[in-house]
Amino acid sequence: MKTKVLLLMLILFLTNEIIAQKFENLAQTPPMGWNSWNSFQCEFVNETVIKEMADAMVEKGLKDAGYEYIVIDDCWQIGRDKNGYIIVDKKKFPSGIKSLANYIHSKGLKFGIYSDAGIKTCAGRPGSKGFDTQDAEMYAKWGVDYLKYDWCFTEGQDAKISYKKMRDALYKTGRPIVFSMCEWGENKPWEWAEDVGHLWRTTLDIDMKGRFDGDIWDNHLGWTTILDMQVGLEKYAGPGHWNDPDMLAVGNNDMPENEARAHFTMWSMLAAPLMAGNDLRNMSVNDQNILTNKELIAINQDVLGKQGFKIEDMGNFEIWQKPLSNGDMAICLFNRETKGKKYQVDWSKIKIKDFSGTYKVKDLWKNKVIGTTDANFTIEIPSRDVVVFRLMK
Ligand code: GLA
């Protein structure tokens, strides 16, 4: 009798493991979009902001460049009704979420929302713990295409179990929804989440306000520090499952043009999700040009889906490589110094993986083929900036 019960339990467990899955064929290249958190946090996010951001995404050429998702982060929700259904904060979103989703869809864009695996979100709004199925059903009804799922107020919860619960709930709705896991790398999701989420955060929040020392370059969660934390994670990323080093801080905290260019380039090299976090309505022309650079976006969105990796580390000067489809590759020289760096490019000496024969060399920010790898040359990489090449067969 006991054996029969155990056998039955085993069958039930296995069936659930086999049936349970995430939506395949989504996020085959890193997701691109905009998220409300970096610029609007809890206090300033509302329906008008989100609509205007969708308008700006189209008008400023981001949609044409490949940006797709408009994601409302925390603070759209306010409570639960007596049946457990989530209640929308009507002060911020008077027309409701469905109508906002319709608006975003009418622009040819996709719509994302945010919740949390715990009892509360990080801003103290209601989380989804115990309400996974109901929430997922609601999202599907509203036309949600992307869910960012946070990890605050989860004391005593197991990350794998919690994230799988929401994955299953989303899958059961039948609506393809990209599942963006946000547990800050605490439980090394890259080791177990390939079948759970389409992307997972690898670190705590990127600094977009200079909250530690006024700078967002290299304080303990400035973007260069986050970049260093990605080294070694490259083997875990690929089509449908990406490491997420957090949103872009381009356009935040008056990031200078050289730093913004370097940041955007390195996120492109990492095959990181490109989620802008600036106010698209009034961004500078420089930020707009950086965010919409077609050559760099092509590196990020390359269908091979390889995350770039560091091949040389000379202190404050690094070389990174990203393999691309058709045997192409991107090679990025990154100068972290506060002064310019002269560098002699000798193609035979750089430790490039799988380098063979001759390639055409295109300088991507100049958008110009400058020669072939048969010729060496000296180049100046300005302070806190990059020079990035596409090597083409
Ligand atoms: C956490 C996440 C952030 C953001 C906020 C919202 O800190 O890591 O990206 O979603 O919560 O409260």
Image (tube, helix red, strand yellow):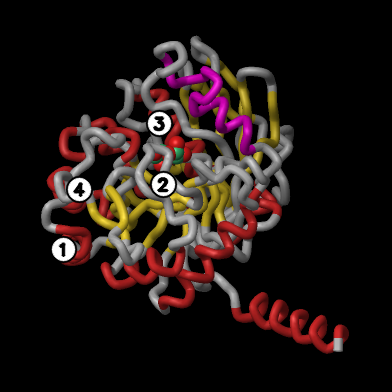
Q: Which residue is mark 3?
A: 261
Q: 136 or 207: which is nearer to us?
A: 136
Residue 99, numbered label: 1
Which residue corresponds to the image point at 28% horizontal and 33% vertical from the top-left? Answer: 39
Compared to 144, does 206 lie above or below? Answer: above
Give the percent coordinates (x, y) of residue 206: 47, 31
Which residue range is magenta in the image? 215-230
Which is more N-terminal, label 3 or label 2? 3
Disc 2 from disc 3: Cα separation: 13 Å
Is 277 on the left-hand or right-hand side of 316?
left
Compared to 296, does 172 lie above or below? Answer: below
Which residue corresponds to the image point at 55% horizontal and 45% vertical from the top-left? Answer: 154
Q: Within 10 Å of the Cα at label 2, are there few (<14), some (14-19), or many (20+) other Cα atoms?
A: many
Q: Amino acid at mark 3?
A: Arg
Which is more N-terminal, label 4 or label 1? 4
Q: Secondary structure at mark 4?
A: helix
For the residues bearing labels 1 and 2, Cβ distance under 8 angstroms = no
- State the image quarter where residue 377 is shown: top right
Q: Which residue is mark 2?
A: 274
Which residue corresponds to the image point at 21% horizontal and 35% vertical from the top-left? Answer: 44
For the residues bearing labels 1 and 3, Cβ distance under 8 angstroms = no
Q: Amino acid at mark 4?
A: Ile
Q: Quadrant of the C terminus?
A: bottom right
Q: Amino acid at mark 1?
A: Ser
